[in-house]
Amino acid sequence: MQMDREEKYMKMAIAEAKKAEAMQEVPIGAVIVLNDDVIAAAHNRRETDQNAVAHAELIAIEEACKKLGTWRLEDAELYVTLEPCPMCSGAIILSRVKKVVYGATDPKAGCAGTLMNLLTDERFNHQSEVVSGVLGEECGGMLSDFFRSIRERKKKK
């Protein structure tokens, strides 16, 4: 039953990632859930906003904080299509997100278990539960297809 719930919210994050892809952004999406309600949803906007920190997770965290009127997301769960990077992992820790569920691993920047695990490091004042690989093939495939198409376009030029 738990996996069904996690897949349900990951599919919502995938829908956000598809919005990013339609904007020619790297297809990464995130949703934040509190008490089985989606309180925030976002996708990458780095190219659109020309902002290095416009990652899906950070935009979703900001939206959730505004909606709740607090920076503490202690009972919230974050669903994201790609393993959080160091910057996003830091924001997750600082906003005290209870649980992070991600799809694809990130061998170049993953800080929820791949390169390191900032989210469960007990040296920080907060740790998040981490669940990896939920709809991972679909999430990873979307990213692979996106970057393959970029390489093909560059080759044609």
Image: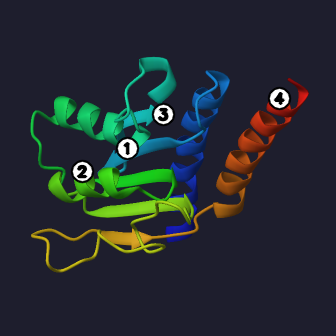
Q: Is residue 59 left or right of residue 56?
A: left
As drawn, 140 above or below 25: below
Query: For the N terminus, which image quadrant?
Result: bottom right
Q: Nearer the viewer, mark 2 or mark 4?
A: 4
Residue 102 in the image: above or below residue 63: below
User: Which three-letter amino acid code belongs to the residue tagged 1?
Assistant: Glu
Mark 4 or mark 1: whose residue is earlier in sequence: 1
- Label 3 neighbour load within 10 Å: few <14, some 14-19, many 20+: many
Residue situated in front as seen by the camera: 145 or 43 = 145
Report which quarter residue 42 is drawn in: top left
Nearer the observer, disc 4 or disc 1? 4
Q: Report if the CB atoms under discs 1 and 2 are less than 8 Å apart.
A: yes
Pointer 4 residue: 153
Q: Spatial distance from mark 2 to mark 4, Cα to Cα? A: 34 Å
**Residue linked to disc 1:** 57
Q: Amino acid at mark 2?
A: Ala
The disc at residue 91 is: 2
**Residue 64 x %, y %:** 25, 37
In whole angstroms, how far apart are the C-alphas of marks 4 and 1? 28 Å
Q: Residue at x 56, y 66 (%)?
A: 107
Residue assigned mark 3: 43
